[in-house]
Amino acid sequence: MRQLFSPKSLREVSPTLVRNFLTDVIRVRVSENPILEPLVFTYYITLRCNFGCVFCGFVQSGVTKKRSDELSTEDSIKLLQVIRQFSSHIYISGGEPLIRKDLGEILAECKRMGFHSVSVNTNLGTIHKQMEILDHVDNLVVSFHRLDDKERARVCQISEKMARQVKENLEACIRLQREKDFVLTVNCVITPESIDSVREVMDFCFKNDIRFEAVPACLEGGWSDKALMGNEAYQALVRDIIDAKKKGYPVIGSFLYLDRILYFKDFDCYPGLVPYISPNGDLLYPCQPIGTVAANLLECGSYEEALRQGIRKHGGRPRCGNRCHKVGYIEPSLAVTHPIPFFRNL
């Protein structure tokens, strides 16, 4: 996961994470289709979203404007209890998680359950109404794709008033990092038309000492945008990001990852390292882009049982080549397949 190997402090590196990681390093070397221990779970707590980002696969599919089959507060907490049996790291995403008015309650329960690291991905549009969530978050990952308010409004299909609110909320979160003891990461999606804008966002992050992460756009179904492949301006941008990381700027993403997205190189993908859970509690197997379901975690009561059902239904891990280049799959996969160069150059 994007935050998994860049914790804010060593206290986020739990014994469970270390044990699972070392087990997986061994298993990928002795089996073509290993059953892996999960490092971090991603829970899509909702697919609804108040933005309409033009590059978002969920927006393209229309699910963000529908009432998704979401678990209640009580059942969401039960689901997280099942997850906690197998991992100490949780990444809550969407859609837009802050659409859930019970998000603060659910995050507080995550802490009570003993999750070592709780990450939330948000567009920041309404966080000023729920600032209490910052008391329960270790990593706040902010989707922020344009520095200019008008451009941000256009790309996210929101009002200019909302676009200005996002910038104000980001500035508030920058100020609150130390007081609330969380780290802030800006996640910026690269599209063929956004390359100059990504540079502006990157400079803003470095000036404000915010961790910066750039990811190539994934289209509906997880497909990489072919317009970025062989795009010289895109390649120049990624090289500049690599150079900034070498100079010590707060760039999230290993050098191995950045090398993969530079030319969209193939990689051995092990999506079982980062299980994705749908809003209704379904385990997406073998991975989120393919979108098939193993079983429902709440109904099974166990991740292991849900995984077994997924393997029986859909077989082993996928071998997609370069269909998608999702950082949440590339980074953990590279970490277990190339642990020494990965951590040496993190």
Image (spheres, rainbow, N blue to C red):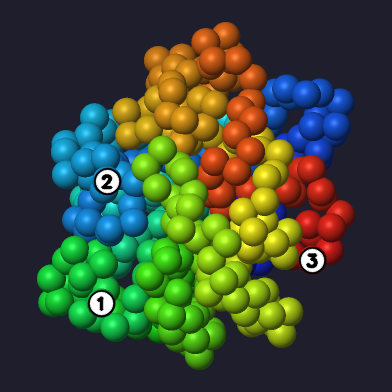
Give the alpha-carbon distance from disc 2 to disc 1, as whole Å.
19 Å
Compared to residue 292, the image places residue 165 above or below, namely: below
Q: Judging from the image, what secondary structure is the residue with disc 3 in?
A: loop
Would you say residue 104 is visible in this rendering?
A: no
Q: Is residue 301 left or right of residue 151?
A: right
| Residue linked to disc 2 | 60
Q: Residues within 10 Å of mark 3 (few under 14, many from 20)?
A: few
Q: Residue at x 25, y 64 (%)?
A: 156
Checking the image for residue 345, the label placed there is: 3
Q: State which mark lies toward you, 1 or 3.
A: 1
> Which mark is first along the chain, 3 or 1?
1
Q: State which mark lies toward you, 3 or 2.
A: 2
Give the alpha-carbon distance from disc 3 to disc 2, as whole Å.
36 Å
Q: Residue at x 64, y 26 (%)?
A: 317
Q: Which quadrant is the C terminus positioned in?
A: bottom right
Q: Specify the amino acid type for callout 3.
A: Asn
Q: Specify the amino acid type for callout 2.
A: Gln
Q: Is residue 4 left or right of residue 183?
A: right
Q: Is residue 16 left or right of residue 302?
A: right
Residue 142 x/y as whole percent: 40, 66
Q: Judging from the image, what secondary structure is the residue with disc 2 in?
A: helix
Q: Is residue 22 left or right of residue 118?
A: right
Q: Judging from the image, what secondary structure is the residue with disc 1 in?
A: helix
> Which mark is first along the chain, 1 or 2?
2
Give the alpha-carbon distance from disc 1 to disc 3, as whole Å.
35 Å
Compared to residue 189, the image places residue 176 above or below, namely: below
| Residue linked to disc 1 | 151
